[in-house]
Amino acid sequence: MKISKDGSGAIVCSGNMVISEIESIQSQMETILDECSHKVIMDLSKVEEIDTSGLQLLYSIKQTLEPEGVFHVCAISEAVKETLIISGYERFLQEVVS
């Protein structure tokens, strides 16, 4: 998984957000999140595959930032949308699933 920031400051994730890569993803995310203020915007439109460990990581970031900060996902791929719906996590990212 490649994690970077785009010109607007959004965190862009590309590749697979799955259990076999979760430690690496978590490490990369910690570094990037340390540089962010209390507002995190994520772009998941380039995520090709995500499993429940990836969803749990996103949920953990959301819980850590809120209620004092903001966590928003601006875009998701079809693969992320399908996994959100199947797993029941769609209410957690309802603004991008609809």
Image (cartoon, helix red, strand yellow):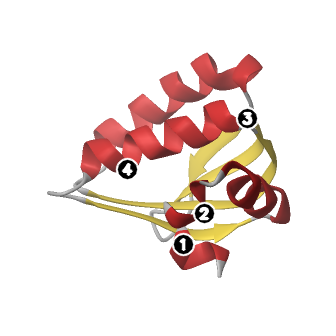
Disc 2 residue type (three-letter): Glu
Q: Position of residue 2 (x, y in %)?
A: 70, 39
User: What is the CA distance from the residue labelled 1 to the residue labelled 2?
Assistant: 5 Å
Q: Which residue is mark 4?
A: 62
Disc 3 residue type (three-letter): Met
Which residue corresponds to the image point at 51% horizontal and 44% vertical from the top-left? Answer: 58
Indicate the secondary structure of the residue bearing disc 1: helix
Which residue corresponds to the image point at 31% horizontal and 49% vertical from the top-left? Answer: 36
Front tag of 3 and 4: 4
Q: Which comes before the other along the chain, label 2 or label 4? A: 4
What number of labels is visible?
A: 4
Pointers 1 and 2 in contact (CB under 8 A)? yes
Q: Which residue is mark 3?
A: 1
Q: Which comes before the other along the chain, label 2 or label 3? A: 3
Quadrant in the picture for residue 50: top right
**Mark 2, residues whose alpha carbon is within 10 Å: few (<14), some, or many (≥20)?**
some
